[in-house]
Image: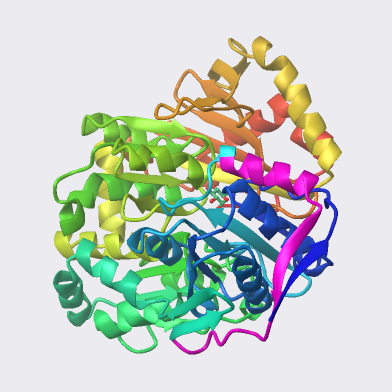
Amino acid sequence: MELLKITTQPIEGQKPGTSGLRKKTRTFMGPHYLENFVQAIWTGIGGATGKTLVLGGDGRYFNDRAAQVILRMAAASGAARVIVGQGALLSTPAASHLIRQRKTDGGIILSASHNPGGPDEDFGVKFNTPNGGPAPEDVTNRIFAATETIESYHILESQDVDLATPGEHALGPMTVEVVDPVADYADLMETLFDFNAIRGLLNSGFRVTFDAMHAITGPYATEILQNRLGAAPGSVMNATPLPDFGGGHPDPNPIWAKPLVDLVMGDDAPDFAAASDGDGDRNMILGRGIYVTPSDSLAVLAANAHLAPGYAKGLTGVARSMPTSRALDRVAEAKRLTCYETPTGWKFFGNLLDAGHITLCGEESAGTGSDHVREKDGLWAVLLWLNILAARGESVADILTDHWNTYGRNYYSRHDYDGVDADRAAGMMDALRAKLGDLPGQSFGSRKIAGADEFAYDDPVDGSRAEGQGLRITFDDGARIIYRLSGTGTVGATLRVYLEAVETDPAKLHGDAQEALADVIRAADEIAGIKTHTGRDAPDVMT
Ligand code: G16
């Protein structure tokens, strides 16, 4: 085994986005691309020497090859041990758990989350810190700075490590420990939820369908829902992870998981259905005849979490990302909990969770989670829902109706304009930013703008400040429009427009979201000139 020092030079554009570095797979496969970034991670965390790290990914194309490169680089840089999920697989929440459980120095997760996979699709690399959470901006800034000055990287020349067999393997002076990717995570879930109650529900004829979308949660959902909780065989669909996710977008929303939505809207609907994404941190919740928006799901979970044993003591506080609907705020107010508003990106919840300020948090982008790990967690949300359903003995639709009757409904939708020319998208944001000061007081239909600003966040724990986190328009009746450019896309710019309106009239709680939001949608275009700037007539995706 030879230790190689390879001469390289900086590669442009290795700046981590909302969640790690995401690029086209072929970009990552290009000469030195992955290696430069991994060496920059070592630099950004003060070197790999003596460290114990976790490594795993969502199984997408190039996952296995990238894992071998990272292991050889970790060994060459003096890491003591790398704990790898068998087959180089780990869901993002399971990786977060392993990082914490084994008290490691952090870990590398290979995933581009909900983005499609394959040689012509997307790949990603993300570093998580010892608390199990995505690296905060000071760390990612150091990593990025290292990518801009890199001159060489270190790698061991060796055979591939056998990642198919659990146990310890030597790689030069480093130990590679291959572990079952599912067992520890499944055990953690058993400590949080009343598995007996859920088992009883599933034995009573209550039918569940979980769509793993040919992504990482297949083995996790099969073990937990079918093997441990007794859901009928076949309850987990698309359960085998595939390198290209079967050619689909592993994104659990009504567009990309349409077959599941069709199922719950059909005659033979299960009582409860859910889906997760490429790396297992997102979730979509459905009941018979009903889709629960992520923002509503977050609010329902916050209102009912005490019904699960792991949260029986109540919540210390809650948090949501700024564009997430304020349905959560209504629950927090009623329960006298502080509700923190953070920028988009799970990394911003980390300090609040570590400091014990919050127990539960979530985002409009189909992510909910709690202090059990430091990532959002798709199956956790599914199990919390099942625990609540078992405890309340009501249907998903009844629980949601009761929730809206109690707290009111925040009608909500996100409109995405994908692959917009980056300059045009930036031009729209610049023009809107320039006129924010003139907007308060202007009327659109029956609503008047009460406030308009660009969101910035001062972290209450470490005092760090994040600026430029979305343009925010608030109306006098609580409606909101948020404009943001996505930080996870790999082609051009994705413009996200988040739309929200508050309804408390019991007669108007069951409408269609797009119809209920029609005036807000119109105002969003009038205010920002979306069509003119982007050249698009309609959004590509509405969730
Ligand atoms: C990531 C982040 C989330 C964020 C989402 C969307 O999710 O972890 O916090 O809400 O991206 O970000 P953006 O609007 O910038 O595209 P995931 O599931 O892709 O890791």
**In the depicted view, which residue is nearer to us: 283 or 403?**
283
The picture quadrant where one finds residue 413 is: top right
Whether residue 433 is situated above or below residue 321 in the rendered picture: above
Locate the N terminus by quadrant: bottom right
Colour setup of the view: rainbow
Left or right for 383, reference 2: left
Residue 42 location (% of width, % of height): 62, 54
User: What segment carries the magenta color?
Assistant: 139-166
**In the depicted view, which residue is nearer to us: 514 or 116?**
116
Left or right for 197, reference 325: left
The picture quadrant where one finds residue 160 is: bottom right
Whether residue 404 is situated above or below residue 202 in the rendered picture: above
Q: Is residue 153 a member of the stretch shown in magenta?
A: yes
**In the depicted view, which residue is nearer to us: 503 or 453?**
453
Residue drawn at point x = 55 percent, y = 62 percent: 108
Residue drawn at point x = 43 percent, y = 52 percent: 130
The reply to whether residue 287 is visible in this rendering is yes
Residue drawn at point x = 64 percent, y = 14 percent: 439
Residue 268 location (% of width, % of height): 38, 79
Residue drawn at point x = 40 percent, y = 38 percent: 351
The reply to whether residue 253 is visible in this rendering is no
Left or right for 309, reference 442: left
Residue 402 location (% of width, % of height): 24, 47
Q: Is residue 470 a member of the stretch shown in magenta?
A: no
Whether residue 150 is situated above or below residue 76 in the rendered picture: above
Left or right for 528, reference 440: right
